[in-house]
Amino acid sequence: MTILFDLDGTLIDSTEAILESFHRSFDLLGGIHPDNASVKALIGHTLEDMYFNLGVAREEIDTYVRTYKEHYRVISKEKTELLPTAKKSD
């Protein structure tokens, strides 16, 4: 038997890590920083689609995604929280 569920938004909240990683990519690569509300409105879409909808040129998206993922890997654990309705296993 296989059970699938959506981890982010169901058991954990990684919004802070997502926002920080987006801003980091814009810090490093330039472009107009999106506001947090614009990024949050796109959470759930692929990173490629998110960057495209935030105004990044298609030919630059892979670089932005790579930069995002490099930063997210470093900060995700400390910036992700268990949602209060999720039970922690002992």
Image: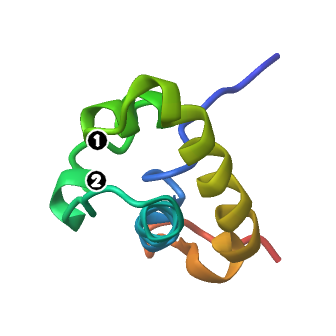
Disc number for residue 42: 1
Look at the numbered discs 2 and 1 and tell me whether their residues touch, using CB distance below 8 Å: yes
Q: Amino acid at mark 1?
A: Leu
Front residue of 28 and 71: 28
x, y percentage for residue 12?
A: 53, 62
Residues 25 and 3: in front is 25
- Kind of residue indicated by mark 2: Val
Q: Is residue 3 above or below residue 80?
A: above
- The mark total stands at 2
Give the structural element (helix, strand or loop) at label 2: helix
Residue 41 in the image, given as x and y percentages of width and height: 21, 46
- Work out whether residue 14 or residue 86 is closer to the camera in this orientation and state it: 14
Q: Residue at x 73, y 59 (%)?
A: 70
At x 59% / y 55%, what residue is drawn? Answer: 68
Q: As displayed, is residue 65 above or below residue 81? A: above
Residue at image x 66%, y 83%?
Answer: 78
- Mark 2 is surrounded, within 10 Å at the Cα level, by few (under 14), some (14 to 19) or many (20 or more) other residues, namely some
Q: Furthest-top residue in view?
A: 1
Residue that mark 2 sits on = 39
Q: Position of residue 48 (x, y in %)?
A: 48, 30
- Residue 69: x, y in percent? 67, 53
Is residue 35 toward the left or the right of residue 70 in the image? left
- For the residues marked 2 and 1, what is the alpha-carbon distance in whole angstroms? 5 Å
In this figure, which colouring scheme has been used for the structure? rainbow
Image quarter in which the N terminus is found: top right
